Amino acid sequence: MIETADTREGLLSKNRFSRAVGLISQLVRRQPLNFTIAVSAAAIFALFTAGSALGLRWVIDHVVIERFKNGSVPSATVITGSVILISISLIRASAVVVRRSFAGRTQWGAAEKIGVEVVERYAQQPVSWHRDHVAGDLIARAGVDVDASVAVMAPLPYGSSVVLLLVVSAVGLLMTDIAVGLIALVIMPLLTFANILYQRHVDKYYDEAQKELGKLSEAVLESFEGVAVVKAFGAEGRETERLSVIAQRLCDARVSAVTARATFEMLLNSVPALANLVLLFVGAIRMNSGDLTIGEMTSAIYLFTLLIVPLRLVGYVFAELPHSLAGWARVRFVVDEPLRNDPRRMIVVADASFAVVFNHVTLGYADNTVLSNVSFSIPRGSHTAIVGATGVGKSTLLHAIAGLVDLDEGSIEVEEGGVALVFQEAFIFSESVRYNLCLGKTVDDSVLDEAIRVADAGFLYEMEEGLETSLGERGVSLSGGQRQRLALARALVCRASVLLLDDTTSALDPATEMAVFKNMEQSELIDSVITVASRPSTISISRHVLFMSATGYVRLGNHLDLLNQEPEYRALVEAFNDDRSSGDPK
């Protein structure tokens, strides 16, 4: 089959239609009851909207015309007409309230469920996946993109009942008068066709706008998080310009979409107005020939006028559909992405004699190999220091033990009870001290007290509201050393068998650091400690030292043996000593 422009357009239309049906079915599945109620209320509104034209015809023929002809109308007739009009109005008003209420519940109920699905998917993905994605973009997909994807649900219940209203109205108009009915039947497909053309034209603008909105969210978050760097290097102007360029692209895409929408709404307003003029002209001729009564003609024009509102609602559905499809596509991009293998599931329980065992482990990032065929066994119940020059992979090794990075080859075994990792930069939540220690879990006060004691974090009790004190964003009210001790206490609360410290005590003075390590040796909250160390004092108190050479060589031994047998290790420790003697704050 030879592909032509027409066949390509047909395929695109089919794909667009299937995407729209797929989106709507997915949203309805998440709120079936609320959607059914909203659609039912909209159908009632549609039926009584069409019925209002019949009620108006009855009132004109039996009340208004009768009053002009005879000068008076029986009270019973007036009351009947009033009851008909008031009843129809009340039912329509009630249906509107129910429709809007349950349409809102459908929309935001679906948004809640989709948002939870996105966040749960984020939680299921391992750390390596998150490192490959920008936080700002992920936030945008879980926020503005979710909101965009459900936007079509607001007008959809009413829009879905328009088909019923059009059928009933078309039959009513044809039964009233063939000529008038045919005019209406010609105008309605024209407006529907205009809706379809609009949706095709505006799709690309909404897709582009949604992408740029995600990029802007990503850039703004990055700029806020790096505000200290921006100000330190005097880059405020350049950063503002960078954000302005992205914002301008977003603005251009939105303006193009709004322009298309304004043109479309102008068409929706002008075509029915012109159609009403044609109806009046034809209707006047039909009334003059006696084929139509005044009541029938009035009800026909009134019914056609009423149709403009639901036809506009269909227009709103078509207007929101590209927006929702664009948001839904970005949401599904992350939700449908296959789950990566979680490295934590590959870690097995070590023999009772060992805290950590590496079996021919090879790992790295991109083309950079950090560890190559490394094997060693760290005894259980020991304090081990990891020593090496900057960039040899000390932190990566700890992350591998914690199951945060994938192994290219080999396997890792860890002492039963698992590990707890304290990162080099302690992250503090803008919550209470207690939340930061327990992360929402229920923890026995005795365990909490012991963890705080071991971490030498008694200052937490002395804060204004004790453990209920709010720490502000990223723990802004704490010093570097206080943040490290809080993070250490948080890890101890987990009661993991192996505690991993990524240069965690670097902000502590030597005396406090020694006190903390002594407390850990005497505490039952922890069994084995593995720490990245750059202080000679820390290295000297460690029972074992894992030396990582710049050439990729790894050796486990004790401090004195390594000093005597490893020239690179000896040079590194001497460099550490020189740094201390020259006034290094560590």
Image (cartoon, rainbow, N blue to C red):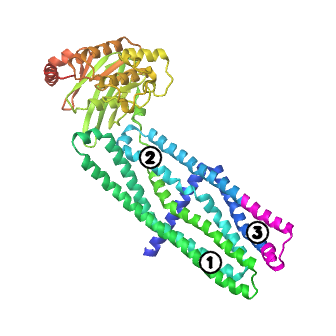
State how far apart marks 3 and 2 are (Cα): 59 Å
Residue 24: image x %, image y %?
A: 56, 57
- Is residue 178 visible in the rendered image? The answer is yes
State the SS at label 2. loop
**Front-most of 347 and 488?**
488
Q: Are marks 1 and 3 in contact (CB under 8 Å)?
A: no
**Front-most of 347 and 429?**
429
Which residue bears the numbered disc 2?
338
Q: Which residues are magenta?
A: 61-90
The amino acid marked with disc number 1 is: Asn
Which residue bears the numbered disc 1?
276
Q: Residue at x 42, y 45 (%)?
A: 139
Please state if 501 lies on the left or on the right of 268 as rendered: left
Of labels 1 and 3, earlier in sequence is 3
The amino acid marked with disc number 3 is: Gly
Which residue occupies the extreme bottom position in the image?
289
Quadrant of image for the C terminus: top left
Q: Are marks 1 and 2 in contact (CB under 8 Å)?
A: no
State the SS at label 3. helix
**Front-most of 130 and 297?**
297
